[in-house]
Image (cartoon, helix red, strand yellow):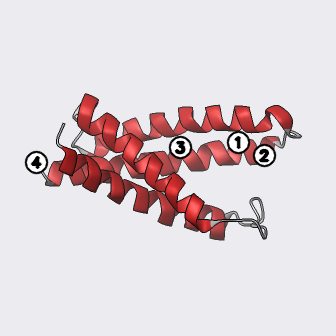
Amino acid sequence: MNVKNFLISGIVGGIVDFLLGWVFYGMLFKDLYPQNEHTNLVFIFLGCMTFGLFVAYIFTKWAGITNAVTGLKAGAVIGVFTSLSMNFFMYSDMVLNLQNMITDIIITTVLGAAVGAAVALTNGKMK
């Protein structure tokens, strides 16, 4: 595995996730997902970077994905399964809000697709 490609594409993916997450959760759907006084942007950023590096690891180490369209598709699959898992665990001890759950799954799938495309495109440019 090319560590440089992994790190650079993972950071790019994390930044894409953070910025698009802000657009979706902070602007477009802020009424469904309101911030509170405990919201910590540092941890949100770290979570986004972790997801970007996770996708980059899969693409760089195992899948060799360097095409934006393939990255978009693979990222969407990773996003939907990650979101399903997270939402199932989150709602295991919360009152189920089906609208929020479905909206979050769709948003996370779109974010995963964007991160996947960005990671793949970055890897492809560094070949």
Q: Is residue 69 above or below residue 61?
A: below
> Marks 1/3: CA distance?
11 Å
Residue that carries the numbered disc 3 in the rendered image: 109
Q: Are marks 4 and 2 in contact (CB under 8 Å)?
A: no
Q: Label for residue 99?
A: 2
Tell me the kind of residue under disc 4: Lys
4 left or right, relative to 9: left
Q: Residue at x 74, y 60 (%)?
A: 33
For the N terminus, the image quarter is top left
Residue that carries the numbered disc 1 in the rendered image: 102
Q: Residue at x 51, y 49 (%)?
A: 110
Tell me the kind of residue under disc 2: Gln
Residue that carries the numbered disc 4 in the rendered image: 127
Q: Around disc 1, counting alpha carbons within 10 Å, would you say few (fewer than 14), some (14 to 19), or many (20 or more)? A: some
> Marks 4/2: CA distance?
42 Å
Give the image location of residue 117, x and y in percent. 34, 49
Q: Are marks 1 and 2 in contact (CB under 8 Å)?
A: yes
